[in-house]
Every structure is written in structure tokens, then in C-alpha cells.
Image: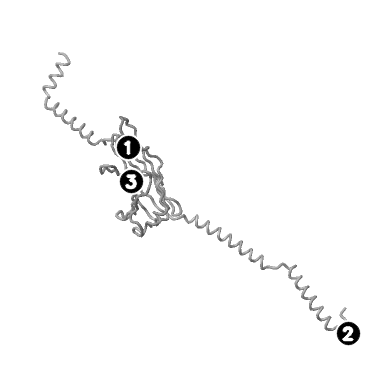
């Protein structure tokens, strides 16, 4: 019996099992396709996870887009909140060219931890990389023409860390596009710390050293050497000697 005939007999005898296997495989393939993203849209925040209050807080944002995503960013929203109070937020909205469009709230202190005015006054958003405008078929930047080149947006978001009280914070970037489309980044967490005690101790030590120098300088300016004192005594002695000699001379007494 040929192999084909044998296989046919096996399939016929196990028709139900084979049919069930085919249906199961088809369902699995469908689930995998449905779970696979249509494009490569990816938004990521990253940076140092700890910063002192006397430094700058700098967070970098990367947005990678493929033309097949048909996603043209028109607005970015960066949000910061204390880890313990996620409902207390400061949001910064900026355009693709890095121009700040809005900061909310406009003033005050959020959760008694984030000084909004300090954030606004020291905020800098620097575009590191973004597609050149003028390409594509209406999606804004570099889409169309059959190309599948990945488009990249990179920003550096920085502000003075003294806008935050010591503690833990979290942040996230939301990218908005035409048609109400959005994409969210990972939640990036960071800690704001005060300078270490060693640094304070070094500063205090320098102060004590300078204080000691100032004290020595003052002592030097007020202190007279024995030679200086002897000179003054000699001058005063000669003055009184001349005065007495003059007085006695009026009576004919001469002091040798």
C-alpha cells in the first residue's frame, strides 16, 4: 500500500479529530494576528531616576512611528504627579516644534509639593529630532509614497529640580494626533533628593576655615609686637622728660 493511500485511510478514520485540529489552529492564528499591533508606534520616557534639588531634572522622550500607523502628532502632553497623589497633577502641553502651549494649573503649589511657577519659569523643551515637514499625503510628516521608513521624534524636557519638594514622583507623555488618536508612554518615576550631608559638611568645613582665617586676620590687625610697644613707651617717656626739664629749668635746675 502506498504512503498516500495509507495517509488517506488514517485521515478518513480520524476525520473529526483532524477537523478539530484545523479549526483550533485557525483560531490560534486569528488571535495572534488580532493581538499584533498594526504598526510600530512606540512612545518612551527615560532619564535619571534620582536628582538633587540643586540640579536640573531632565527627561527624554522618544516617539517612533511607521507610515503604516497613519499617525501624525499635533500635540504632546507631559504630566507629572507625586507618587502618593496621582490625582494631583501638573500638565505641560507643547507643539511638535517644542513650543509650550499650556501649563495647568497656571500657578500655586500642587499637593504642597510641586511649585508650578518654578516649573513654568525654568521649563525648557528642546526638540532633538523630528521629521522635516512637507512630506506625505496629509498626515503631516513623511508619510506616503510607498515608503515604510520609521519616523522619529525626540525631545528633551528639563526644569529646575527645586520646583519639587523632596520625594517620589511619576510622569507620562501622551501623544495626540489628528482624528482623536493618542498614544501613551510608559510611566517614568524619579526621586527628588536634597544634597548629601557630606556635601553640607564640606561646605561647613570651608566656612569654619574661612572663619578661622578671618579671626586670625583680625588678631593680626589688633595685635602689637613687643618692638612696637617699646617704641611707644620711649616716645612717651621722652615727652615727659622734656616737659619736666623745661619746668625745672625755669628754676635754674638743670637735668643732666
* Disc with the residue nearer the chain's start (1 vs 2): 1
The residue sitting at 26% across, 35% down in the picture is 38
Tag 2 secondary structure: loop
Numbered badge on residue 65: 1
- Judging by the rendered image, the residue that carries numbered circle 2 is 252
* Disc with the residue nearer the chain's start (3 vs 2): 3
Residue 131 location, x and y as percent?
37, 37
Residue 63 location, x and y as percent?
34, 40
Tag 1 secondary structure: strand
Residue 102 location, x and y as percent?
34, 51
User: 191 left or right of 32?
Assistant: right
- Residue 20 lies, with reference to residue 47, above or below; the image says above
* Disc with the residue nearer the chain's start (3 vs 1): 1
Identify the residue at the far top of this view: 1
The residue sitting at 16% across, 13% down in the picture is 2
Numbered badge on residue 76: 3
Say which of marks 1 and 2 sits in front: 1
Amino acid at each position: 500500500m502506498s504512503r498516500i493511500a495509507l495517509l488517506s485511510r488514517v485521515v478518513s478514520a480520524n476525520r473529526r479529530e483532524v477537523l478539530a485540529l484545523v479549526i483550533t489552529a485557525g483560531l490560534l492564528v486569528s488571535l495572534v494576528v488580532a493581538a499584533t499591533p498594526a504598526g510600530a508606534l512606540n512612545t518612551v520616557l527615560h532619564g535619571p531616576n534620582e536628582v538633587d534639588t540643586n540640579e536640573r531634572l531632565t527627561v527624554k522622550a522618544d516617539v517612533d512611528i511607521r507610515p503604516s500607523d497613519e499617525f501624525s502628532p499635533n500635540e504632546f502632553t507631559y504630566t507629572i504627579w507625586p507618587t502618593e497623589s496621582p490625582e494631583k497633577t501638573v500638565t505641560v502641553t507643547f507643539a511638535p516644534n517644542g513650543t509650550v502651549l499650556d501649563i495647568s494649573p497656571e500657578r500655586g503649589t500642587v499637593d504642597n509639593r510641586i511649585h508650578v511657577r518654578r516649573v513654568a519659569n525654568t521649563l525648557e523643551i528642546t526638540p532633538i529630532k523630528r521629521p522635516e515637514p512637507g512630506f506625505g499625503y496629509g498626515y503631516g510628516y513623511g508619510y506616503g509614497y510607498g515608503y515604510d521608513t520609521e519616523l522619529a521624534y525626540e525631545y528633551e524636557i528639563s526644569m529646575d529640580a527645586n520646583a519639587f519638594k523632596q520625594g517620589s514622583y511619576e510622569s507620562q507623555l501622551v501623544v495626540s494626533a489628528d482624528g482623536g488618536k493618542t498614544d501613551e508612554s510608559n510611566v517614568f518615576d524619579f526621586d527628588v533628593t536634597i544634597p548629601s550631608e557630606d556635601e553640607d559638611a564640606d561646605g561647613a568645613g570651608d566656612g569654619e576655615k574661612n572663619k578661622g582665617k578671618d579671626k586670625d586676620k583680625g588678631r593680626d590687625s589688633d595685635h602689637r609686637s613687643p618692638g612696637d610697644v617699646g617704641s611707644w613707651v620711649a616716645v612717651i617717656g621722652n615727652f615727659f622728660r622734656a616737659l619736666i626739664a623745661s619746668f625745672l629749668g625755669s628754676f635754674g635746675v638743670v637735668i643732666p
